[in-house]
Image: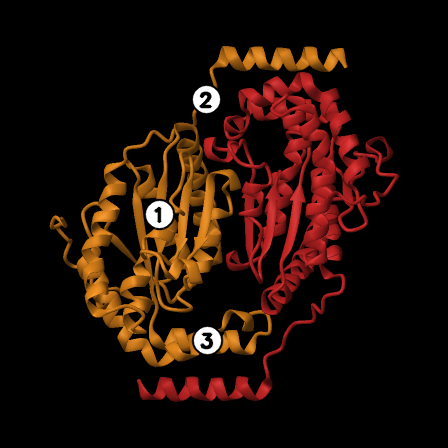
Chain colours: A red, B orange
Amino acid sequence: MTRSIETLTGSQLGDIDPDQALRDREEYKYLLDKLQEKMLQIQLAYYTQGRRAVIVLEGTDCAGKGGIIRRLTQPLDVRGVQVCPIGAPSAEEHRQHYLQRLWRRLPSSGSIAIFDRSWYGRVLVERIEGYCSQSAWQRAYAEINDFERMLHDDGVPVVKLLPVITKVEQMRRFEERLRNPRKQWKITSEDIRNWHRWDDYQLAFQEMLDKTSTECAPWHLIPGNRKWFARIEALKVVTEMLAQGVDISVPLMDQKLMKQAIEMLHRELKGS
Amino acid sequence: MTRSIETLTGSQLGDIDPDQALRDREEYKYLLDKLQEKMLQIQLAYYTQGRRAVIVLEGTDCAGKGGIIRRLTQPLDVRGVQVCPIGAPSAEEHRQHYLQRLWRRLPSSGSIAIFDRSWYGRVLVERIEGYCSQSAWQRAYAEINDFERMLHDDGVPVVKLLPVITKVEQMRRFEERLRNPRKQWKITSEDIRNWHRWDDYQLAFQEMLDKTSTECAPWHLIPGNRKWFARIEALKVVTEMLAQGVDISVPLMDQKLMKQAIEMLHRELKGS
């Protein structure tokens, strides 16, 4: 039975200013360094303490999800982080419950999973394209809230980011992708179909915010028109949320153990 | 039935000079930029042409595999590359054929899979620690050759890299990890146990080279004592091998289609 989960109010797409910007490249570099250092420290803590975390990125095409993910993962060790791009389901996945392929990708002990799109596909692309029935996507809001609360109750923070760009900015980025041979591959015919769907997506995003921004797993809107600002903002939110209730002070090795290990190492070297 | 696969001769651990170095940081930066640009171009080609590739990294602890993987993947899009760290098998994987968990991780169309350790665990750690019977790891050389030839025959290049460091350099890096709080987490008790296994590993690496450096999938020894040199060398090998027989010239979009798309985009903007 689905229990009712209290959703937060006040996350309105229209309330944020997507044009917020940093002062300059200097400020960007400075903040990026500082936040990436903190991100590494957090990963250390999660890894050594066997914790798990889930980060979810949703957003329109060209919203800058990829760039944010790159800055999040750059400082980390591949052993402690996994990026899960969630595209169209495979033929086999298509025959399963929509949460099934996502359960399979949840992180193991010591690992942080970053979902590039996620279970929210149910109430976004699947809703808009009619890939599932209306009753199915309407039911999904509560199912997703339950799912995320289960994770939360198991000690797994679920950090949800929604970079928000304007339609004009999206079109600007599409044009850039079209004109830049290095970026053309990122455009699919589905993207082009989506251009006509802007309003449908805005509606679906707003309903998603209204129904799934919960105490356990609130949505974080990221002003997205300026890429530097968006990346810094995303890193701020993620580092702040993941550090909550976790001792992220660097886990110093026992000093005696360390000395012993170094002595052993030196003996090993002399012997060879 | 295992067919005999001709192995190459001449890959001797002792033949390379692990101390080879670049001139300076300038040279490193210059070459890194150039090679990463090429790597992105290759990924573009693999993605758009639906090709698959496998890159394998083996090596002693501290050999620099992680650093190499980071430089290989930095320029790429997460949708077209997957890093597969292969550690100790899970309880379930332990009950399966050793190749089973690796088959599951082979890349799909358009994707490049990078294995941070691999099926070679069978003839390295499993051999040395006695995790499998002697007949099992001895049988594995031919099984692995067959496996890699199957991939090769299916159009999947298998690029195998072995960064080689000296024992003195390994001990130096261990000490650095021990003393640096940011790196201590990378040391496990298994690593410390391995310090006594240096000679066993050298023997196992050499036998691996002798028996699995095939025409289809030769091993590439990477001088590893100097990290910059090793990374550049690895990128050179990977870009060269992946580009063989593949048209990596940037796939320009059909110009007429592009114009149409941009016009549609502008109409879309005006209408909104």
Disc 3 and disc 2 on one polypeptide chain: yes
Q: Is B121 located above or below residue A269 in the figure?
A: above
Residue B103: mark? 1
Residue B241: mark? none
- The picture places residue B67, in percent across and down from the top left corner, at 46, 58
Closer to us: B75 or A39: A39
Nearer mark to the viewer, of 3 and 2: 3
Q: Quadrant of residue B18?
A: bottom left
Closer to us: A239 or B11: A239
Give the alpha-carbon distance from disc 3 to disc 2, as whole Å.
48 Å
User: Does residue A223 appear left or right of residue B202 in this picture?
Assistant: right
- The picture places residue A57, in percent across and down from the top left corner, at 66, 41
Q: Chain for mark 3?
A: B
Q: What residue is at 41 percent from the left and 38 percent from the top?
A: B108
Q: Which residue is mark 3?
A: B174
Closer to us: A136 or A88: A136
Give yes or no for contact between labels 1 and 3 (Cβ–Cβ under 8 Å): no
Residue B252: mark? 2
